[in-house]
Image (cartoon, helix red, strand yellow):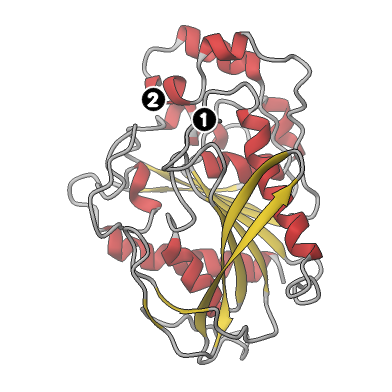
Amino acid sequence: MPNATTETTDITEARLAGMRTLTVRHADHPTIPVALFYPTKSPTKKMRLGPYAPVVSFNGVPDLPLKGLILLSHGSGGSQLSHVNLALRLAESGYLVAAPQHPGDNWDDRSLVRSETYFAERPRQLSRLLDTLLADALWRDQIPAGRIGALGHSAGGFSVLALAGGMADRQQVLHHCEVTDDDQLFCQLGGDPEVLAEGDAAINFDVQDMRVGAVFAMAPIGVVFAPDSLKRISVPTHVVTAEIDAVLPPKYHGNWLRARVPQAEFEEVPWAGHFSFMAPPLVQLMSAVGDPGEDPPGFDRARYLLRLEQQVIDFFDKTLA
């Protein structure tokens, strides 16, 4: 795996990626297992972790200082390692990356997905992770003030945009799924009309976290947001979408957001599919919405991910400086 380089700082030279685990505990909520990636100069080796084999120094000594902290939110049904390539490159570049396995919305547990609290609870899990890191004896004094970003894919893309100020509107989703017949994967997994209609009207969907200073969203859920709430997004925001997204049709998600978040940077990736932003698994992984290792014909995921990795590093280097 190539080491990240930069022309603007010396602290990334000869840095490798360390990895360790963290558990977020809260009296009123499920525990959150987290993979932490960070810069190190300790020896690395390839580790087989489920369907991935990252080159890391497990429990290696952190090489300080850090550039900042990046919260990394996987898509629905994913895991801490769904974007391990991005985590490694960011760590090699000097960032602490915190990748949670979202309770109730991961490969092993989908219990939260059809809950009326889904669109409030998912981003709040990221805020609880941030609370834990900022209180952790090892990391609290190492995370530079004002240098916290968030990166997410699909439902994770929604989650980071919600941290930036977007608010879910349950009734809007209900109406969308009642009148739309070409967004069925979203409506089956995240917009169940019966669940939404029976939901608690008192749920607070305002999950904005002012500690997050920049967000990067990949193929995010879009139509769930109340349009007026998107005007609250004032932090630097970059959104990449897939031209051939068979999971979240662009007209209801990526392009829908483009028309309503004019202050954000948008980019459509030609020929990319919904899963093209994920680390390629070593084995076939089938999910409720398809194979995460599959791309549209002719799309070179390995080549694109190299560009995406550098793009993400450059974005956070610029916006969190």
- Residue 26 locus on image (x, y percent): 74, 47
Is residue 80 visible in the rendered image? The answer is yes
Kind of residue at badge 2: Leu
Q: Nearer the viewer, residue 254 or 110?
A: 110
The spot of residue 194 in percent (x, y) is: 54, 9
Could you tell me which secondary element the residue under label 1 belongs to?
Answer: loop
Q: Which mark is residue 180?
A: none
Closer to us: 259 or 172: 172
Image position of 259 (left or right of 53):
right
* Residue picked out by circle 1: 111
- Furthest residue to the front? 27
Q: Which residue is mark 2?
A: 185
Q: Is residue 209 shown left or right of residue 245?
A: right
Q: Neighbour class for label 1 at 10 Å: few (<14), some, many (≥20)?
A: few
Indicate the quadrant where residue 281 lies: bottom left
Badge 1 vs badge 2, beta-carbon distance below 8 Å: no
Give the residue drawn at x 36%, y 73%.
47
The residue at the point 69 percent across, 35 percent down is 166
* Residue 154 against residue 304 in the figure, above or below: above
